[in-house]
């Protein structure tokens, strides 16, 4: 879109291990099998193009599209998403 971005794009993640792997550039022996895309994310975090932040599962609105949820959580996320009125 050819627009200058002044702040990093924030990606919310509910997995603390993933966040640690993205932020720590040190090679981990237990992570050598991980896909190359994590190396690209590490580069983007180091270049401050992307920021990874923790978001608890109960507040991860995207889960409504990706996971089977309990009814209560489904309706909570649906309200957070703006699909129903409170």
Image (tube, rainbow, N blue to C red):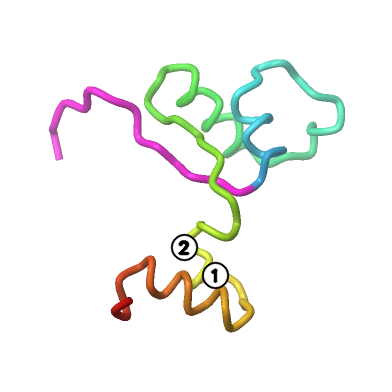
Q: Quadrant of the C terminus?
A: bottom left
Circle 2: element type: loop
Q: Contact (CB < 8 A) between labels 2 and 1? A: yes
From the image, tell me which residue sits under label 2.
62
**Residue 30 counted in the magenta span:** no
Q: Which mark is residue 66?
A: 1
Q: Residue at x 60, y 35 (%)?
A: 38
Residue range (magenta): 1-14
Q: Residue at x 47, y 62 (%)?
A: 62
Image: 23 above or below 74: above
Q: Residue at x 38, y 66 (%)?
A: 80
Circle 1: element type: helix
- 57 or 51: nearer the viewer: 57
Image: 67 above or below 48: below
Judged left or right of residue 15, residue 33 is: right
- 44 or 15: nearer the viewer: 15
């Amino acid at each position: 879109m050819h627009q200058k971005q002044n702040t990093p794009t924030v990606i919310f993640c509910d997995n603390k291990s993933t966040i640690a792997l993205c932020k720590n550039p040190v090679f981990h022996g237990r992570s050598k099998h991980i896909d190359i895309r994590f190396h690209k994310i590490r580069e983007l975090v180091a270049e401050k193009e992307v920021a990874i932040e923790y978001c608890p599962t109960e507040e991860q609105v995207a889960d409504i599209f990706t996971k089977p949820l309990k009814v209560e959580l489904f309706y909570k996320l649906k309200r957070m998403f703006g699909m129903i009125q409170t």
